Amino acid sequence: MALETLPTPSTPAPRRRVLIADDNRDAADTLAMLLEMSGNEVCVARDGEEAVSMAASFQPDAILLDIGMPRLDGYGACERIRLLPGVGAAFIVALTGWGNDADKDRARAAGFDRHLVKPVDPVQLLEILAAVPARKP
């Protein structure tokens, strides 16, 4: 679905802090643009180690993690993020090309809340994020 065909909400959605972690620069930047256009504050990490570090400082409401990243894969990043004070309760989504049953089971065991296979439907992703509680200003 093209960005210009996304539905426009009648009332502005609460601003959420979203961390995107993906070593595919084009995929991460495109997703960041979509989420920023939807009113979210977005931060992008390029690998799992950077995702853990940024999660600690950015304090996101939601995190979108690719699984196959360098230095630390998404499973390990999710497990480490769950241990961070003030961040462990963030809503974490595996956003990956890996989608068989074993991958989904491993994602659940690592602490992911959802598992989405790329390419993700932007409307579905926005609906999922809309259900994530936003921080109070």
Image (cartoon, helix red, strand yellow):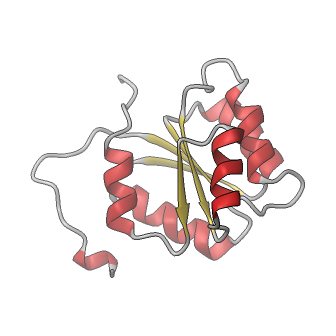
Where in the figure is residue 47, as x and y percent of width and height?
Answer: 78, 56
Identify the residue shown where x is 32% and y is 40%: 131
Left or right of 37, for residue 89: right
Task: Name the residue at the bottom extreme.
Answer: 2
Q: Quadrant of residue 25?
A: bottom right
Identify the residue shown where x is 62% and y is 76%: 26
Task: Name the residue at the left extreme.
Answer: 10
Q: Quadrant of residue 133?
A: top left
Task: Name the residue at the right extreme.
Answer: 71
Q: Quadrant of the N terminus?
A: bottom left
Residue 18 in view in this figure = yes
Identify the residue shown where x is 65% and y is 37%: 111
The tally of labels here is 0
Q: Is residue 131 above or below residue 118?
A: above
Q: Quadrant of residue 5?
A: bottom left
Front one among 118 and 50: 118
Where in the figure is residue 35, as x and y percent of width and height?
Answer: 42, 57
Where in the figure is residue 2, as x and y percent of width and height?
Answer: 33, 81
Front one among 16 and 63: 63
Q: Quadrant of the C terminus?
A: top left
Q: Is residue 110 above or below residue 56?
A: below
Left or right of 31, for residue 9: left
Identify the residue shown where x is 51% and y is 45%: 18
Where in the figure is residue 63, as x and y percent of width and height?
Answer: 57, 45
Residue 39 in view in this figure = no
Task: Name the residue at the front extreme.
Answer: 101
